[in-house]
Image (cartoon, rainbow, N blue to C red):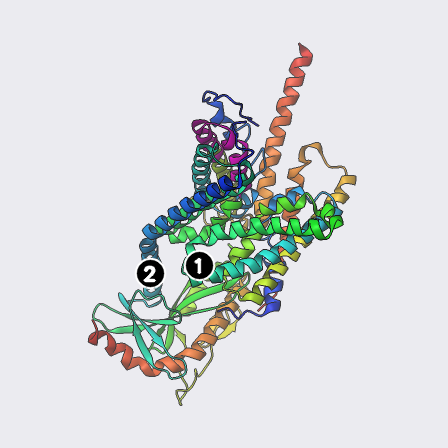
Amino acid sequence: MAVGFEQEQSVTPDDFIKGVWKQNPVFVQVLGMCPVLAVTNTAINALAMGLATAFVLLMSNIVVSTIRNVVPKQVRIVTFILVIATFVTIVDYAIQAVSLDLHKALGAFISLIVVNCLILGRAEAFASQNSVARSALDALGMGVGFTLALLCLGGVREILGAGSLFNVRLFGESYQEWVVMMLPPGGFFTLAGWLLLINWYQQRKSRLQEAKESTL
Amino acid sequence: MTNDSTDAGPAKIYGVVLSVGLVCALAIVTVDEITKPIIRNNRIAMRQRAILEVLPGASTSKAFQIDETTGELKPEPTDSEAAGLVFAGYDDNDELIGLAIETQGMGYADIIRILYGYSFDKQAVIGTSVLESRETPGLGDQIEKNANFLANFESLDVSLNAEKSEVANPIEFVKPGEKTEAWQIDGITGATISSRAITKMLSESTGRWIPKLHPHQADFATREKEAP
Amino acid sequence: MNDEPLWSIFIGSCLINNFVLAYFLGICPFLGVSGKLDTAVRMGGAVTFVMMVSSMAAFGINSLLMMIGLPFLKLISFIAVIASTVQLVEMFIKKTSPTLFRALGIFLPLITTNCAILAVALFQTNKGYGFLQSIVYAAGAGIGFTLALVLMAGLREKMELGNTPELVKGTAITLIIAGFLSVCFMGFAGLFS
């Protein structure tokens, strides 16, 4: 976890990249699980949810980092939550204005972005201790990482569960849909599957490294 | 740590929380003001789409409110969002196509809300549209997609009895493929409960409203020409 | 506005639309605190309690906001109410029962970020429940949450003794079990009609 120091550090590309891969909020930190499982039954829902969360994350990180020196320690969390709730309400209305169908599909999970531990977590652990530019970059990285993870889940669930991706049919009429993938259990199974894949990759990597070291 | 305000006094604490709260509230109010008309338009456009969908051939609609005890009809503005509205649909020549009525009931997972179209001439339900449902994707949501099931509603008999007091044959649910009468609904294999829920909602709603609405055919048909 | 009978609300929020296994709410504590049966029961109790208190508070707030015509401040006031409810409950328990406080101690702050609590407040207003209906809804949701947590903890305690492959240990196996539990809970759907 990046801990801020007294001096303003320079902006590094790592601020962005770590959120996408090394500290991916979903696959590595296992944060903000509720929307990850609930609204990823199709790729479009997953993308919309990811973008909405990324927007709230970016805006709240910027604001929190801007006011970080003014807010007394005792009311830090309350202020952060107020800021986050404001942006979530804004996103909620914006989505309703753009497409009511999308709003219906995402349901209450837009409002529930407020309690996504990822956002409060980044505000508290990063934005409240770092410069605006770095916080923005951090939020962008985490947002992109979160959106990608959601897309991974939504894509797999839509392909298996409905035989389509972004509403485009992939297989012929004879394809028998795995209905269970669209249902709640499918969310759990798909996420478990991705975690297994990542575990396997990391174990293989460390095994290869060990083998390399022992031969040296 | 950059946070140098660990020993802030109560005045500062209150000040900061209050001003943050105020700014947040202002921001929300502004966004609400900007988006309110757009969202309202979206909602009404969505409703209008559903009305025209359940009344094939209709191109315009008008909203009415009916008093359940007195049976009196009251026209409402087309963009009204009052509860318990019925909508009359008209074709391009302002001829009455039928009524669109909303109803709801408990489905498999949660409440299902549907809109159905009633034709005075055929004395039948001529279309349905699911407004809201959380039915199981792939199984229960067949009520929105299954062509055989939707064919039930092309002309579902709800004609009144001789005294015009109630529906002669309340809508009935039958097993898939066993439909013999015009007032029966063919169920869906794999979505028995959801399709039965739709049947029950329609049966209750038509039983309650059609006898009250049917006598008003002339009112619905003429009202449009008086008040364009 | 909504005349759903109380028993149907209760069964609905507890079993059919179980907050954890059907709505995916409160997954973080579900994955985090379900390691031991004992802590799972306590956490469940604390969540149920806070849910009911904040449900009552949310009902009051919502009526007030509707009365003065500011429905768009709903979300921001709900979250503020929940955060302060948790604080109040914490202080109250600390004063009245230090033993209970020690038992619940670390769980109380965790509850603020439990999305299930906010969801109860939001859903009950969406569905237009009255005061009594709201409380029953919250109680059902809380008991359903406890049930899921306890079932999970029981299974995980058993698994400690089993021989799980290195690869699936940790979150992965927990999610797979949760998936199977969720399949089981689907069987409750369609209890009505």
Q: Are marks 1 and 2 in contact (CB under 8 Å)?
A: no
Q: Is residue A157 above or below residue B211?
A: above
User: Alpha carbon of mark 1 to alpha carbon of mark 2: how far?
Assistant: 23 Å
Q: Tell whether C151 sits left or right of C122.
A: right
Residue A6 or residue A104, whichever sits in front: A6
Q: Residue at x 61, y 43 (%)?
A: C28
Q: Quadrant of the N terminus of chain A?
A: top right
Q: Tell whether B135 sits left or right of B41.
A: right
Asked where in the image residue A2 lies, by quadrant, the reply is top right
Q: What stretch is highlighted in magenta?
A: A116-143
Q: Which residue is drawn at 71% across and 42% down?
A: C35
In magenta segment, residue A141: yes
Q: In this view, does B96 lie above or below B27?
A: below
Residue under numbered circle 1: B145
View extreme (top): residue? A216
In magenta segment, residue A127: yes
- Percent across and percent down for residue A161 are 52, 47
Residue type at mark 1 is Lys
Asked where in the image residue B45 lies, by quadrant, the reply is bottom left
Residue under numbered circle 2: B44
Badge 2: few (under 14), some or many (20 or more) residues near its Cα, within 10 Å? some
Residue C9 or residue A77, whichever sits in front: A77
Residue type at mark 2 is Ile
- Percent across and percent down for residue A97 are 35, 51
- Image mark 2: chain: B
In the rendered image, residues at marks 1 and 2 fall on the same chain: yes
Whether residue C24 is visible, yes or no, is: no
Q: Which residue is drawn at 40% across and 71% down?
A: B84
Q: In which quarter of the image is the C terminus of chain A?
A: top right
Whether residue A22 is visible, yes or no, is: yes
Sequence-wise, which precedes: disc 1 or disc 2?
2
